[in-house]
Amino acid sequence: MTLHLLKLCVGVETVDELGIWQKARRKEGGWDGSKRNCHVTRMGPRRADELLEGGSLYWVIKGIIQARQGLTGIEPLVDGEGVSRCRLILHKDLYLTQPRRHRPFQGWRYLKGEDAPIDIGKWGTKVAKGQLPPHLRAELAELGLL
C-alpha cells in the first residue's frame, strides 16, 4: 500500500503560482544550490521508508487538494539557528489532481494511497481537450460543484 503526505501550500493562491515559484527556485539553485525541489518542515515523518516507496506530497491550496509531486528523498537538516528540521526532496514534475476539499491543519498528514485523488494531467502542459484550466477547477471545487 502506497503512503503519501498531505501538506498545506501556504502563501500560494494557485497551482500555476506554485509551479512558477518552484521553477524559479530550481533555476536559482534552491536551498542548497543543487537545483532540486525541496520543502523544509519542522518534523520529519517517522514512516519515511514507506513514503519513499512511490509516495507523493499532495498540496492543499486554498482548502482544496489540487496537485502532487513525487517524493524522491527525505533528509535531516539543521538550519542556521541550530534547529533540527526535515528536507523533503520533490520530483520536479507537478501533477494536477482531481480537486478535493480538505479542512485546514498544521504541519503535514499521512494520506493512504487508496484515499489519494487521481491525477488529471501534468502541470505546464497544454490543457487537454475538454479539461478545465486549473483556476476554473479550483473555483468550481470551492463552490462544491466538482
Image (tube, helix red, strand yellow):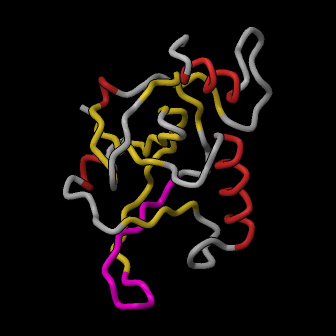
The residue located at (26%, 58%) in the rendering is 45
**Horizontally, is 101 left or right of 124 in the view?**
left
Quarter of the image that includes the N terminus: top left
- Nearest to the observer: residue 50 or residue 142: 142
User: Which residue corresponds to the image point at 54% horizontal and 36% vertical from the top-left?
Assistant: 67
Q: Position of residue 28 (x, y in %)?
A: 73, 72
Q: Residue at x 59, y 31 (%)?
A: 96
Say if 110 sits above or below 138 in the image. below
Question: Relative to residue 64, is residue 24 depicted above or below?
Answer: below
| Residue extent of the magenta highlight | 78-90
Which of 57 and 12 lies nearest the eye of the viewer? 12
Q: Residue furthest left?
A: 46
- The reply to whether the magenta stretch includes residue 109 is no
Residue 121: x and y, percent? Answer: 63, 26
- Residue 138, percent across and down? 61, 26
Is 141 situated left or right of 123 in this image? left
Q: Residue at x 25, y 53 (%)?
A: 49
